[in-house]
Image: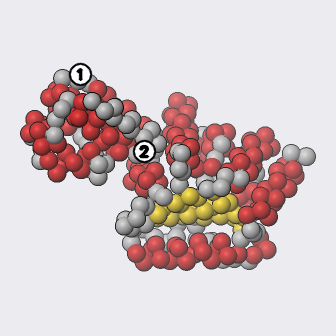
Amino acid sequence: MTALPEPDPYASPRIRFGAELRKVRLLSGLSQQKLGNLVHMSVSQVSMIENGRRAPSLDFARKVDAALGRGRELTDLLDRLNRAADQLPRWFRPWLDFEREAESLHIWQLSMVPGLLQTEDYARVFLSRNPDATADQIEEYIAARMTRQEILERPVSPLLWVVLDESVLHRPVAGPEVMKGQFERLLQAGENPRITLQILPYGAQSVFGLLGSFTIADLSKGERSVAYIESQRIEDPVSDRSGDLKNLAFIHDSIRADALPRRESLNLIKETMRRWTT
């Protein structure tokens, strides 16, 4: 039998589970119809789970394991994926699949370095200030944020169009060493040909982004874009409404038009890093 491809380790949990389900089904010599008959599901439901279009349940995973005689293989996999997702706020989880599956991400950040470009130490500054979190929970939150960054390590990573307000560079959220490490991370990202990093300077006098930060995820061809809005006077943090997307795309384009060019932006980061460390 031809060897089956391994599931993409950077895909979303639904896609990772679906790819593993397809692999074990084919290794067992079953069609989707036959597997559906064994677990009392329609072929369309099995197909949707395999394609990552439907979230699997633990009961489904247990039934497949039992039907195929695979112990707890799929059950344990789904349990690990669910526990990893539990380290993130519930309201943020719907965004994660869109972020992982995006072909490009358009990011505007008014107040801090975006999570995809944060260092572990910089992330710890923010995540450790949750008064209700234990030390172990904080470390789990940090690990989950670092895991999000794995999408940038793919052979073909999503295109990033990132604009930071200049205030992000000057706000003393941590000591010089943490800030220096974060600046170095930004400079490294700025040299990546798939990441365009720009700074919106104070002198631009731009007001377009003052209502808050946001990210627009452009999904695969034929699928509607989705936005994650930290604040733009929009009720839902995750939106695919055409009016919201049209307005946010206009705002992002306007901010980029006022921002420094790529090379000048990196030079400003270097200059600011020197001031932080001298």
Residue 184 in the image, given as x and y percentages of width and height: 75, 46
- Label 1, secondary structure: give it: loop
Residue placed under numbered mark 1 in the picture: 71
Residue name at image x 60 percent, y 40 percent: 128
Residue 55 in the image, given as x and y percentages of width and height: 28, 47
- Mark 1: give few (<14), some (14-19) or many (20+) Cα within 10 Å: few
Residue type (three-letter) at the residue carrying disc 1: Gly
Looking at the image, is mark 2 or mark 1 earlier in the sequence? Answer: 2
Instruction: Using the rendered view, name the quadrant where residue 135 is placed.
Output: top right
Residue placed under numbered mark 2 in the picture: 11
Residue name at image x 37 percent, y 37 percent: 5
- Label 2, secondary structure: give it: loop
Visual colour scheme: secondary structure
Residue 129 in the image, given as x and y percentages of width and height: 60, 43
Residue type (three-letter) at the residue carrying disc 2: Ala
Residue name at image x 41 percent, y 61 percent: 220
Left or right of 159 in this view: 272? right
Nearer to me, 247 or 212: 247
Residue name at image x 20 percent, y 29 percent: 28
